Amino acid sequence: MRNEQRINRRTFFRNCAVAAAGVKSGFAAVQGAAVSESATRKGQPQRNVVLLISDDQGRDECGCYGNEKIQTPNLDGLAAEGVRFTSAFATCASCSASRSVILTGLFNHTNGQYGLEHATHHFRMFDWVKSLPALLKGNGYVTGVVGKLHVGPQESFAFDFVAPGRELWGNRNVYQMAKYAGEFFERDRSKPFFLLVGYSDPHRAAKGFANDREYPGIKKVTYSPGDVIVPYFLPDCEEARKELADQYQAVSRMDQGAGLVIEELKKSGRYDETLIVYMSDNGIPFPGAKTTLYDPGVRLPMIVKSPTVSKAGLVNDAMVSYADMTPTILDWTQTPLPAYPLHGKSFLGILGEENPAGWDRVFVSHTFHEITMYYPTRGIRTRRFKYLNNLFPELEFPPASDLYASLSWQAILRREDGMMGKRSIKQYLHREREELYDLSKDTEELRNVATDPSYAPVLEEMRREVVGFRQKTNDPWLILLNYER
């Protein structure tokens, strides 16, 4: 797109507002298929759900995903009993936006949760969007949330049970969180339930990772900076190692909390009727992961324990999207779909498989993190390729405020070699309009082959797929195509 053809920022936002207003009418016209009978039939096993969401945990920060340095015995145990997904992808790497997709089955550029929900950022989903707990309540479910929700508006998430926040210490008092979960499991045993447990660990705190206090009922697990595994997108320096050690500690605390919730569920006698899902909202809070659509930001841990899968310790390589979570839970609970099409599909039927056919691509979409962090990108990830379309490449990529203030990023800025691990600072901050990576040769997404003539057919095909995805999901930013030749 030539400079003289680019619309100014004010016109762009006005046009986006007009386009977003039309999303509702485009979706409401299509009626979703209803699933047969209510899950509350007497005499039938209750199909309950416990959804555990950690905050800023990467796929490699789990023993069962190959990290021999970190202690996560409870998550490892859940994986040993259930199904561990190797290729689960968030649709974006920002907390609120990612959680909105998990809890609606709609990409956040469709549901309106363009960025963070809290404070001055104040992004909210559209009123017409039906949240997962709202749909389940309509099917006779008791719904509850313990800890972090981080999506709005509140009216769309009218849980029956909300744990008091004061005692949760910013959703890090994981022992108390488990006790509240135990209370919820006993709340109304005549009905099936859905419980969301949202941890703040291992998200950064104001300074550090909230490791500066004792947590009741929790064993403190500490790590030496010399023992951590430094990922390729960070420099192997003192600051990064210290912060990774602190991150590991927060992960181990959260792991204990997840184990305590499962223990409470077993005490209630409802474990064998409950679908348990563990996942993280986005990648680790370090530059090169969180807020980026590179794999460290969006390829994440996901473990599912289903009463209907008899074989334990399965490893499933299906490429599943977080947009698939709501359809899967609706499928499990036999809950009718909303009156508009969802963007994902249920993976319930492939839980017992290792390499199911037809699960070989996911789409990604990022627009905002904080209100000041505008960097819209749309893309696709297949087994072999990743394609990213940066809609405003003239902008500098904006680091999140907590990442910018981190010891790791400040150390990177001081480096004389201009590198942040294997990627240069310049490459990280200044992106090309199109990025194409051949993951069969470049798993670390360092060599952009978008301008390589030998990849021209792949580039063209992926362009078409992404445009089709954006059309299907009513992306308001499609208006930009009117200003391109």
Image (cartoon, rainbow, N blue to C red):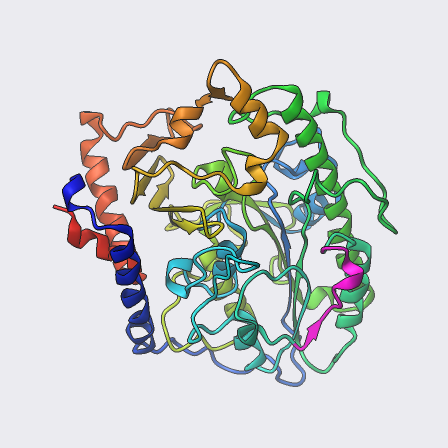
- How many numbered marks appear? 0
At 34% from the left and 33% from the top, the residue drawn is 431
Residue 85 visible in the displayed image: no
With 255 as the anchor, is 84 left or right in this view?
left
- Who is closer to the viewer here, 216 or 47? 216
Residue 414 painted magenta: no
With 32 as the anchor, is 94 left or right in this view?
right
- Who is closer to the viewer here, 84 or 21? 21
Q: Is residue 481 above or below residue 14?
A: above
At 32% from the left and 61% from the top, the residue drawn is 473
- Who is closer to the viewer here, 49 or 11? 11
Picture coordinates of residue 25, whole percent (x, y): 30, 76
Which residues, given as a range, are shown in magenta?
160-170
- Who is closer to the viewer here, 200 or 18? 18
Q: Is residue 442 above or below residue 123?
A: above
Residue 169 painted magenta: yes
At 23% from the left and 37% from the top, the residue drawn is 459
Picture coordinates of residue 462, whole percent (x, y): 25, 43
At 53% from the left and 74% from the top, the residue drawn is 156
Q: Is residue 32 above or below residue 317?
A: below
Picture coordinates of residue 207, whole percent (x, y): 69, 39
Picture coordinates of residue 363, whole percent (x, y): 37, 49
Image quadrant in which you'd find residue 436 = top left
